[in-house]
Image (cartoon, rainbow, N blue to C red):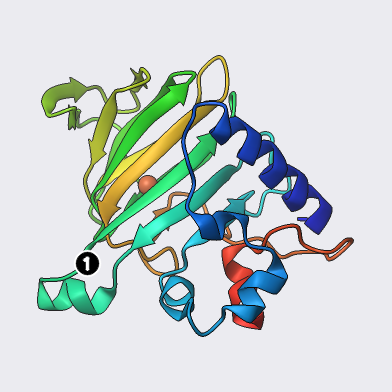
Amino acid sequence: MKRSELNEIIREGEKFIASFGFKMPEFANWTPEDWRRNKHRAREAIRARLGWDITDFGRGDFEDTGLLLFTIRNGSQENLRRGGGMVYAEKIMISRKNQITPMHTHGVKTEDIIVRGGAPLEVQLYNAKRGGGADQDRPVVVRMDGIEHEVKAGGIVQIQPGGSITLEPGHLHSFWGAGGDSLVGEVSVVNDDETDNYFLDMVSRFPDVEEDEPPYRLIVPDYAKL
Ligand SMILES: [Fe+2]
């Protein structure tokens, strides 16, 4: 993706998030220079990969296949292994109208996907088969706001603003904004986007960036260069 495109997506995202009165933490507004200056103090944020994260899943068409994410908090794998401490994570995301996040599941992470505002979110569901792939037959049992639902394989559920779905490991899911852009929250077990995402079709989770203008905000993969 071009840096100019990432900059524009973040600027639009900031406006969209602010339009719901959702307040972002201070470091969301840090310039690249702020990150460099605060690199030591921010080492835990850098380690936990907090901050702006934009992906076109390697398809080169952000409007059709893409997602804006901002990781607000994220614990560590060490805590998860020892079973205590910060074992949770939270994100805010924008899933634009008909903009698809491709079908995937997680090995460890259970996540609640919560529609915080805007358009409803549509989520397509399958059970993952043991050896990989989508089970075309077995209905998917999911909880939405704690209430159990049975959805046929490949069925689509619509989540209204205020509502949520709990996705367990083995639940294959794909989602998009239905009829408009959706402001989406995620509350989950510790998140590791480097190792815990299993996409049905090969995708690249983080974009290669073509530097055609200076960054307005850093995105998570930029931290490696700090
Ligand atoms: Fe997911």
Quarter of the image with the N terminus is bottom right
Q: For this rendering, which residue is in front, 172 or 12?
A: 12
Q: Is residue 105 above or below residue 115?
A: below
Residue 161 percent coordinates (x, y)? 37, 20
At which x and y percent is residue 194?
A: 44, 69
Q: What residue lies at 34% left-to-right and 50% top-to-bottom? A: 105
Q: Is residue 97 left or right of residue 77?
A: right
To which quarter of the image does residue 149 belong?
top left
Instruction: Check the image and report above or below for 66 versus 208.
Output: above
Image quadrant in which you'd find residue 157: top left
Tell me the residue at 50%/51% (across/down).
70
Name the residue that disc number 1 marks.
Answer: 86
Name above or below for residue 122 compared with residue 198.
above
Instruction: Classify 10 Å Cα crowding around label 1: few (below 14), some (14-19), many (20 and above).
Output: some
Is ligand 1 less than 8 Å from the beta carbon at label 1?
A: no
As drawn, the residue found furthest toward the right would be 212
The x, y position of residue 48, in whole percent, is 41, 71
Q: Does residue 132 show up? A: no
- Image check: 77 left or right of 60? left
**Residue 198 can be seen, yes or no:** yes
